[in-house]
Image (cartoon, grey):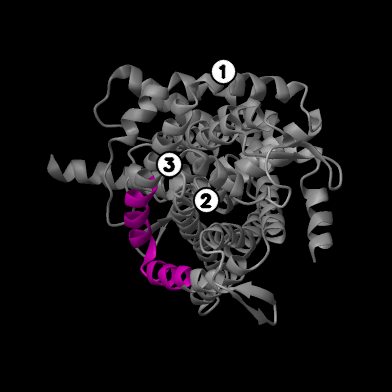
Amino acid sequence: MQELVNVINGYIWSSALIYLCLGAGLFFTVVTRFVQLRQFSEMWRLLMSGKSSEQGISSFQALAVSLSGRVGAGNIAGVAAAIGFGGPGAVFWMWVVAFFGAATAYIESANAQIYKEEHDGKYHGGPAYYIEKAMGQKWYAWTFAIATILATGVLLPTVQSNTIGTAIEQVFSNTGSIETVIGVISYAKIYTATAIVLLLGFIIFGGIKRIAHFTQVVVPFMALAYILISLIIITLNISQLPNAFMLIISDAFTPMAGFGAAIGWGVKRGVYSNEAGQGTGPHAAAAAEVEHPAQQGLVQAFSVYIDTLFVCSATAFMIIITGTYNVHGIGDAFIIQNVASDVVASGPQFTQLAVESVFVGVGKPFVALALFFFAFTTILAYYFIAENNIYYIKRTLNIPGAVFMLKAVILVATFYGTVKAASIAWGLGDIGVGLMAWLNIIGIIIIFFLSKPAIKALKDYEAQQKAGVTKYTFDPKKLGIEGATFWEQRLVNETNKQKDIE
């Protein structure tokens, strides 16, 4: 099974996908005229404003839901893996992916807002919706929807839950184990898996509102606590900070693990972590209640900064400054070995050792707790994304009990991922991320050349900004955007309401 997963990943994560992710980010950065820099202050303003409605959630809640997907195992275990297999220089390429990826995040999230729909009193949208409406290719939209249900409903939850299980097993390593049909499993992992599944079931059966309310409290709190701990560790080792930074920069171009390894691991873990271009963020973006589609595009662009430039960087500097990492070479050889050879690079152990080096006796439980909340909220986001694509399919093919089946499958996948080995879980997760990234990035590039909806929305928003309007409006037909039926109807309703007032 592991060999099969590795072969599939070899095809999906070839150099072509790496160049596609970087190239798309660079392209959208140029065509938006560096929107991620020009509109930085507006991103912050929008983040603090906005209200929810009966149909949708607020901009901040949408950010929290999408951040719960972005800030997860990739920020702790993923960064460790990037350093462990690509060298410290891989961190530089994660930064590059984040900077250019912010423009990609704007494009895909603005598209999701433009082409969203309202079903059963709630907003639904995402790549499947904008691929069908803007590209006119329903088969391609269905392909994305099915791939996303498979990825976020089955493959990706195993990575998040596995990281939680591995971290907690490090804390309670002497709990014993039991022989099962799927191998020897520690009691620590069994108890952890049971707790995760029970809590997950309680929340996902409550719908998007319950998910949004949970994530808007948990994600900011844990992110701030995690960054605070990392800042303390960095401050106590401040003399090593310049050396760590220079190591990241120099190793990015003359890396110990090979130039290609640094780029490959940096881009792979960067895309996995910040999800820009992957097609997950647009689902939360579509659920937001905003005056103009460009607003949520800007908010989602900012979330990439939070994920990679803050949380991932915090992990990277902790690991590199404290020297709690190995760099794997070919086979079983190490290019750098600072810690024991049995410390797994694809898990959270590097990060746990980094915190433990300063906070003795606290490192392992603190990272386990952070991972629990980060990874658990990511699983919630995955469920929300998979459910969105179930609703997309139900527009054409009504499968009785489809949503209930999804809930049952994600609970089983989460339990299985918690108790299995880390290598196969990450391999399955990479397949899911890669499939979605290929389909979504190609889709948004084609849509750009067909009609440029996100660019038109951005220009319209900036024109209204310049005019100093107090309430933004969006008229898709006036901008030459076809298929934005939700916004067309909203404009009609607002016009009629104004006439009634007059």
Q: Residues within 10 Å of mark 2 (few under 14, many from 20)?
A: many
147 is higher (above) or lower (below) than 281: below
Pointer 1 residue: 242
Question: Of the residues under marks 1 and 2, which one precedes in the sequence?
Answer: 2
Instruction: Using the rendered image of the protein, determine whether residue 330 is visible from the camera's viewpoint.
Output: yes
Inspect the image, locate mark 2, and give the three-letter code of the amino acid beneath it.
Gly
Kindly indicate the quadrant of the structure image that contains residue 8.
bottom right
Pointer 2 residue: 126
Q: Quadrant of the N terminus?
A: bottom right
Q: CA distance from mark 1 to mark 3?
A: 22 Å
The residue segment tinted magenta is: 195-219
467 is higher (above) or lower (below) than 482: above
What's the mark number on residue 388?
none
Q: CA distance from mark 1 to mark 2?
A: 42 Å
Q: Residues within 10 Å of mark 3 (few under 14, many from 20)?
A: some
- For the residue pair 132 and 502, the one nearer the viewer reads as 132
- For the residue pair 412 and 150, the one nearer the viewer reads as 412
Question: Of the residues under marks 1 and 3, which one precedes in the sequence?
Answer: 3
* Image coords of residue 495 (percent x, y): 26, 41
- For the residue pair 127 and 11, the one nearer the viewer reads as 11
* Mark 1 secondary-structure assignment: helix
* Image coords of residue 158 (percent x, y): 61, 62
> Is residue 207 found inside the magenta-colored segment of the image?
yes
Q: How many marks?
A: 3
> Which residue is farthest left?
502
- For the residue pair 185 and 140, the one nearer the viewer reads as 185
Kindly indicate the quadrant of the structure image that contains residue 81.
top right
What's the mark number on residue 226?
3
Inspect the image, locate mark 3, and give the three-letter code of the amino acid beneath it.
Tyr
